[in-house]
Image (cartoon, coloured by chain):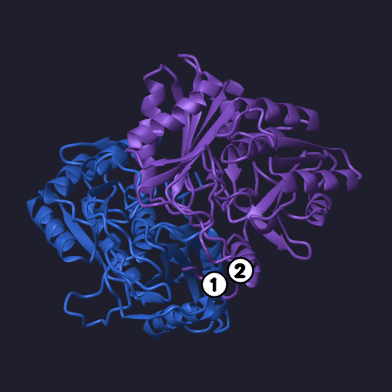
Chain colours: A blue, B purple
Amino acid sequence: MKKFLNTPESLLDESLRGFALAHADIVQLHSQPNFISRLTPSRKGKVALISGGGSGHEPLHSGFVGFGMLDAACPGQVFTSPTPDQMLAAAQAVETGGGVLFIVKNYAGDVMNFEIAAEMLDCANASVLIDDDVSLPKNHVNGRRGVAGTLIVEKILGAAAENGADLASCKAIGEQLIQNTASMGVALSSCTVPALGVPTFQLADDEMEMGVGIHGEHGRQTLPLATATAIVEQLASAIDAELQPQAGQSVLLHVNGFGATPNMELYMIYQLAAHYWQQRGVIIARSLVGNYTTSLDMAGCSITLSLMDEHLLSLWDAPVHTAALRWGC
Amino acid sequence: MKKFLNTPESLLDESLRGFALAHADIVQLHSQPNFISRLTPSRKGKVALISGGGSGHEPLHSGFVGFGMLDAACPGQVFTSPTPDQMLAAAQAVETGGGVLFIVKNYAGDVMNFEIAAEMLDCANASVLIDDDVSLPKNHVNGRRGVAGTLIVEKILGAAAENGADLASCKAIGEQLIQNTASMGVALSSCTVPALGVPTFQLADDEMEMGVGIHGEHGRQTLPLATATAIVEQLASAIDAELQPQAGQSVLLHVNGFGATPNMELYMIYQLAAHYWQQRGVIIARSLVGNYTTSLDMAGCSITLSLMDEHLLSLWDAPVHTAALRWGC
């Protein structure tokens, strides 16, 4: 294993302290239990948006705490759910009378722990479940996984909450958005969890893992490595079959890197994906390309498409000031 | 080699088209010869800032084209200097009467080709040479390499030019800044150039390359892999010996990833580096952490320190609107 490390046990704390120090103008770090919250409290009565999950997906979620996006993020150990006391402490710190909305990726541990926290909360609360990964069938026994579509929900709900949407409205916007969002990823290499020290899975030099999850879970199948155009065709056609965007439909196209894939390759993938939908008359109204929902040091990428309308576009464009997304302020 | 690729020959063009499409609100792509320029022309009489170099270091330089930073960037093939016709065409497209300042990393091909372009230009022009890599001695036969300090020069000169500094002033600010900027990097793995298909160098599982360049050039020495704290101590002490910041000195601390190192590790490195200088009474006035000057898929990072004064801090803080750096607008 080649990593910068003192000990696997100290990595998360050292990293969180670095993150909070580097972005001391935006966030603050709370310890025992760990959570990251906005430095400047939100306006009274705004719905408080809280997300979280296992670490190793940075900048998701801590990098999205700040004006126009999350109020707090709860980082678990690497690829391990945060615990209910983290969510509870975060909620108590950032709730200002508008209730709490939990944004939860669909993994058993995350779902269970956010549910426990919700039961313990003594303020109005609700949750939005993120399950945008179309590599698994809709009726999969655990449901579909939450992957890079999470960022889009966090950005758009962040803007809605800043604009004064109440708890029920935020939940409704989030649930409608995630139904209109689909993602699929492909890995060229495994990631290596620091505490394990060996790759999570093995791929031969001429193989790729199609439909991989963001923890290196297996996807649809291990396939021979194909050209970039053929890979994009597979990812995009699975997404297209799910969402069935019509000609004239506006979309947000997000190409996400898993951590070890260079920008050069990501922008090439973006170009091929944009071409796929433009050929079908779909309007690429907004784009985002980069490493946003990562899987430690995994090489690979995912494509996410969200169907957009004028309201959603205006929420996407609204000002945001976080460590990893920043525009309009 | 595991890369997303159609052919090595088509990668750069496919990637540039994707970049220009994804950021069509900021840049435009020109072909034959290739360069990226701002979508919105700069104000008349502003010094035109142009940089460039081999591709594979993205977001450097194309990701820094836009308001408050570069006017144009000239991408060469992977790790290969752009040609003088690219710089000449870029200069002719973006010069508005204030002259042209070339920002050139110190590599023989880049230096030669920018010099040829400068000789062919029929407007006022000057250049700033970036040689911030302290892993090589000051009297090295080729001089020191230009690495992650480039971004800092591009940002600060971008702001100076927007504020109305003339060509001579921009050159003077740049040269003073680079004398007060030092960087050093370490690699945990090699990168793989797409057209070659094999790693540039080999490192055993328990080795690291200390003082590596951004093309995978060898540095000071191949060493046994050490703890993160020991690695930071080595990088920081080389930088500290060069710049000798005094207690009370304000600095900009930049931790740069080479492409395949996760944010978690970069923020840990940042925390250790900040601690190194804070212990010495140095004031970390500004910070930047992330993959900005990459080396394709190389795992590793560099630390850059710039001594700052109030004027430089105000230029760093000035609005910037590019694909990869954006604040204040």
Amino acid on which the number 2 mark rests in the picture: Leu
Measured from the top left, where is residue B149 in percent x and y?
58, 37
Tag 1 near tag 2, CB within 8 Å: yes
Instruction: Please name the residue that numbered disc 2 is placed on.
Output: B11
Measured from the top left, where is residue B207 in percent x and y?
39, 46
Left or right of B208, for residue B328? right
* Location of residue B279 by image quarter: top left
Front residue of this view, candidates B301 and A83: B301
Q: Of the residues under marks 1 and 2, which one precedes in the sequence?
A: 1
Left or right of A93, for residue B41? right
Image quadrant where one finds the C terminus of chain B: top right
Circle number at residue B5: 1
In this rendering, the answer to whether A281 lies above or below B185 is below
Measured from the top left, where is residue A224 in percent x and y?
42, 81
Q: Is residue A52 visible?
A: no
Left or right of B281, for residue A46? left
Measured from the top left, where is residue A298 in percent x and y?
37, 61
Chain of the residue displaying label 1? B
Circle number at residue B304: none
**Residue at 44%, 50% in the rendered image:** A325
Chain of the residue displaying label 2? B
Q: In terms of secondary structure, where does tag 2 sit? A: helix
Front residue of this view, candidates A318 and A144: A144
Front residue of this view, candidates B43 and B229: B229
Amino acid on which the number 1 mark rests in the picture: Leu
In this rendering, the answer to whether A265 lies above or below A9 is below
**Residue at 57%, 52% in the rendered image:** B59
Q: Disc 1 versus disc 2: distance between alpha carbons?
A: 7 Å
Badge 1, how many Cα within 10 Å: few under 14, some, many 20+? many
Left or right of A58, for residue A140? left
Q: In terms of secondary structure, where does tag 1 sit? A: loop
